[in-house]
Image: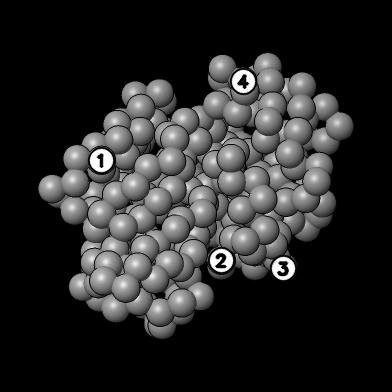
Amino acid sequence: MEKAIGTAVHPLPTGKKAAARAALVDLKEPARLLLSECFRQFGIETVVMSANAVDRLQKEKFEACVLKLGPAAQPMMEAARTSLSNSRMVIYGVGGSAQDAMRFSKYGINAVFQEPLERHSALKLVRATQMLVLHELRRYVRIPVITEITVVMAGDNRRLSATSVEVSSGGMSMRSAEDVSVGQSVEISFALLTLPRVWVRGSVSWRNAPGKTFGVRFDPQDERRHKVKAWIDSCVDGQ
């Protein structure tokens, strides 16, 4: 599922109206300036927030939100996910690792900017997710989301933990500290926001370096995969 992302980005013509808004919550300089520049390259307007963030995320419409991972993030995520306008917004975390983001998994964090922020990496992440922010999900069929996955290996029932990277109707990409083999049959379990925990059979279709990222293709004969497809369709229709 993962593909290399180029770095050549053409700036928008001067005066072009932004197609979406991203809230930057309690971010300090120079991170705020760097991320504002990255989003602006794709026609996404940034709105700086601080003390009034919870109230604004409840009442105003935003397509994305960027906030520092930490105790103060929880009420902001809660405000966004319980808002009729922002329940499906893209949430970016700043700082920490995917494991740190797992503390907020019930809020469906979509991606994490690693600290210290570096322009190349930040621009790469925004470029990889901008279709989702711009509500072009019918062309962007892979949805980035961070959630915990239990992987059960067929044969010996060995269990390992993984963290999702992207999900589509046909499979998932994920990260794990343990190694897997291409072709290995597995059964995976996970939950996604409004999707209760589901089990789906599949097989490892690709992997990067051992202990890094790998992909699981869902078994087309397993009807439980339709629950995942229905969830993705609801994301599309909900936009």
Q: Earlier in the sequence, mark 2 or mark 1?
A: 2
Q: Residue 180's spot in the image, x, y percent?
A: 35, 76
Q: Earlier in the sequence, mark 1 or mark 3?
A: 3
Mark nearest the camera among 2 and 1 is 1
Q: Earlier in the sequence, mark 1 or mark 4?
A: 4
Q: Which residue is mark 2?
A: 121
Q: Closest to the observer: 153 or 48?
A: 153
Q: Which residue is mark 1?
A: 224
Image point (51%, 50%), residue name:
147
Q: Label 4's element?
A: loop
Q: Label 2's element?
A: helix
Between marks 1 and 3, how big is the CA–CA gap?
40 Å
Residue 176 appears in view: yes
Q: Earlier in the sequence, mark 4 or mark 3?
A: 4
Q: Residue 7's spot in the image, x, y percent?
A: 45, 66
Q: Are marks 3 and 2 in contact (CB under 8 Å)?
A: no
Outermost left residue:
221
- Disc sitting over residue 201 in the figure: none
Kind of residue indicated by mark 2: Ser
- Disc sitting over residue 83 in the figure: 4
Image point (29%, 31%), residue name:
230
Image point (24%, 49%), residue name:
170
